[in-house]
Amino acid sequence: MTESIPLRIFLATPGDLQDERGVVLSAVEEHNRRRRRLSNVHFEVVGWEQVRGTARRPQEAINELIRESHFMIVMFKEKWGSEPGSPWGYTSGTEEELFTGLLELGETEQPMRDVWVTFMAHARPHERTERLREQLVRDHALLFESIPGIRELKERLKARLLSWEDMASSKRSRHVDLISSTGKEVLRAARLRIAGEKLVELGQPAAGRASLEEAAAIGGPAENLAFGQFLARQGDLDGAFESTQIAIDQCLSGASDLYATLTAEALAAQAGILRRKGDHNAAIGRLRSASTLLLDSDPFAASIKARILDEIGLAHQKLDEFDDAAEAFAESLEIRMSGTRSGDVAQSHINLARLEVGRKDLDAAIAHAVTANDLLRNAAPTSLHANAATLLAQIHLRRGDQGEAIIHAKRALAYNEQFANTTGEAIALLLLAQIFRAMGDHDRAAEHARECRRLNLEMGNSRGADRAQWLLEQMSA
């Protein structure tokens, strides 16, 4: 046989199913022994027991385990489960685990392949357990099984494990419509958010905005944060600030959720908006506060901490505090180098390149910019590609290589138009105007400068509009 492929099963239950949890563990162990010479697939069971003590909301760490799992078993009997401390949508930890698994089931890139819901027989189940069963029956949202006892549970699990072997090598995404016990449309909101973000990536900003706006209206912190980030890219900084504040308020509505990574991310996003508004000192203070919500021992918080360090570095750079900026960017790069995402590492090199431009060390800047471009070369286009292209164009223009600069500037403009990044589009237009002016083509330079001015005026960015106007006046003179 070839080497075994471990498939992780997350087991979610309220506290009254200890015997049933033991049955699941023994049944999976027995299946692995029986099939070890017949199949290269074996299973391992994980649950809340694998989560170590943490200062953040424990349910978050449990949800991270679910996101790494291939299958899920959710069992109810009498009890509904204990309050998870969630700021939005759920009344028990088991309910939140079920909905987290169902959301993962609908995402093509995630490993979750199937969610098996069972109701063990009991004379007086909790009313919320009964409501969930009734919703499944009424809406045909998800197949489930009613199991009379321990023996039947073991037999049905044997059959389920055999069927899951066939799903080992592929996944078919499935979307499930369920409403949580609080009446929130958690799954629909998340699907709208994911669809909106994908539509923007595919160059359909109007449709993407509609999905993101609807997701924010019915959704929680993640949906309002996503809509705020979209508005910020379009230059609507006031709207973006308002959306991020809604996300922060939703996070903080549950006191036990203070140390959530999502809370820190929302605070950091709002600080980034303050930075773009020119309030750099306020941004730095808020970013430092947000970073205290992240634990160094928490691997899932590392990417957010790196983004916070990026924002701190950018704010220091605007204040010409280059040493402080370099320290923040270097720490961010160190965090990202220990991971596997080349795009994140590219972002750090872009930040370091811009810092070297500020220091007027163009050789060091071009080295970082080329490294970032190489890391992104084989990845699907994102807004990061637009940033890298803009950076390369700016550096080549400063070095007097207009031919190379115009290639990257046109690429940056195309990327930003595709992703509806109006701010990035205005920057690329100004850059093209500067390049054409350096080449002596004042007609085309003026054309791009006027379009840049128009976009900035629409966004209410007077500083950007003034820069375009100054360039037009220089060419007229």
Image: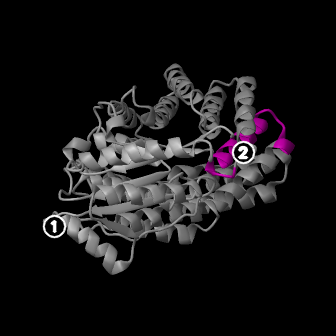
Nearer mark to the viewer, of 2 and 1: 1
Q: How is the image coloured?
A: one colour
Q: Of the residues under marks 2 and 1, which one precedes in the sequence?
A: 1
Q: Nearer the viewer, residue 179 or 220?
A: 179
Q: Residue at 40% across / 70% down in the picture?
A: 142
Q: Secondary structure at mark 2?
A: helix
Position of residue 405 in the picture relative to residue 219 (left or right): right
Q: Is residue 185 above or below residue 90?
A: below
Residue segment shown in magenta: 380-404
Q: Is residue 26 left or right of residue 376?
A: left
**Which residue lies under the disc numbered 2?**
389
Residue 57 percent across, percent down from the top left: 28, 40
- Badge 2 local density, few (<14 within 10 Å), some, or many (20+)? many
- In this rendering, does residue 224 appear at all? no
Q: Is residue 130 left or right of residue 4?
A: left
Q: Which residue is mark 1?
A: 127
